Amino acid sequence: MKEQLIPFADQLPVEQHTRFMRKLAEQLAKDLHPMFDKEIPENPAPDWILSQLYSSVERLIVERGNSLGAVMYRIDLPEKKINALMAGTHPDERIRVLSNEILEREAKKVWMRLHYASK
């Protein structure tokens, strides 16, 4: 199941999964704007989120590679970490690796908001 690929989703009660997926899609759209430009469905599926993320990261690298640093700053991913990851990754794998780092960070932001807002 693709939901297992979404970090932190399994750490929330089942009744919050849909809300988590929606908030995650919204966070990605906000931080990857204008690359993530699709209308977010009411109940975004993990497959949809992953597909949009990968295509957005690919567009970001290809079309706006010079603004990658600014986007990583907005997401709160350290530039040194990203540079080290990219240097140690085969070019064919860079989109996947960068997407996974972005997904991890964005999911953590959303999880923390949902987790601590409910306490």
Image (spheres, rainbow, N blue to C red):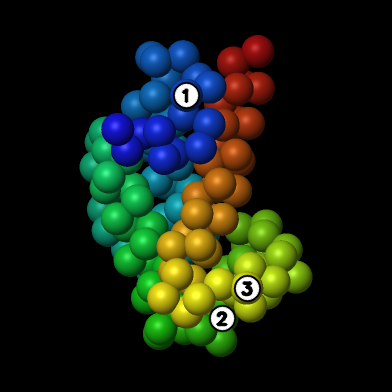
Which residue has dot 1 on it? 10
Position in image of residue 13 (x %, y %): 46, 14
Q: Which numbered disc flags the more N-terminal residue, 2 or 1?
A: 1
Say which residue appears at 75% left-offset and 70% top-offset. 80
Cα separation, mark 2 vs mark 1, equals 33 Å
Say which residue appears at 32% left-offset and 38% top-offset. 2
Position in image of residue 112 (x %, y %): 63, 31
Q: Residues within 10 Å of mark 1 (few under 14, many from 20)?
A: few
Left or right position of 4 against 103:
left
Say which residue appears at 41% left-offset and 76% top-offset. 92
Cα separation, mark 3 vs mark 2, equals 21 Å
Left or right position of 34 against 70:
left
Q: Give the quarter of the figure containing the N terminus.
A: top left
Q: Which numbered disc flags the more N-terminal residue, 1 or 3?
A: 1
**Hey, what amino acid is under mark 1?**
Asp
**Hey, what amino acid is under mark 3?**
Gly
Name the disc covering residue 88, or none.
3
Cα separation, mark 1 vs mark 3, equals 30 Å
| Residue 70 visible from this viewpoint | no
Name the disc covering residue 67, or none.
2
Position in image of residue 50 (x %, y %): 35, 51
Q: Quadrant of residue 108?
A: top right
> Depth check: 66 or 8 in front?
8
- Nearest-to-viewer mark from 1 and 3: 3
Left or right position of 7 against 17:
right
Q: How many marks?
A: 3
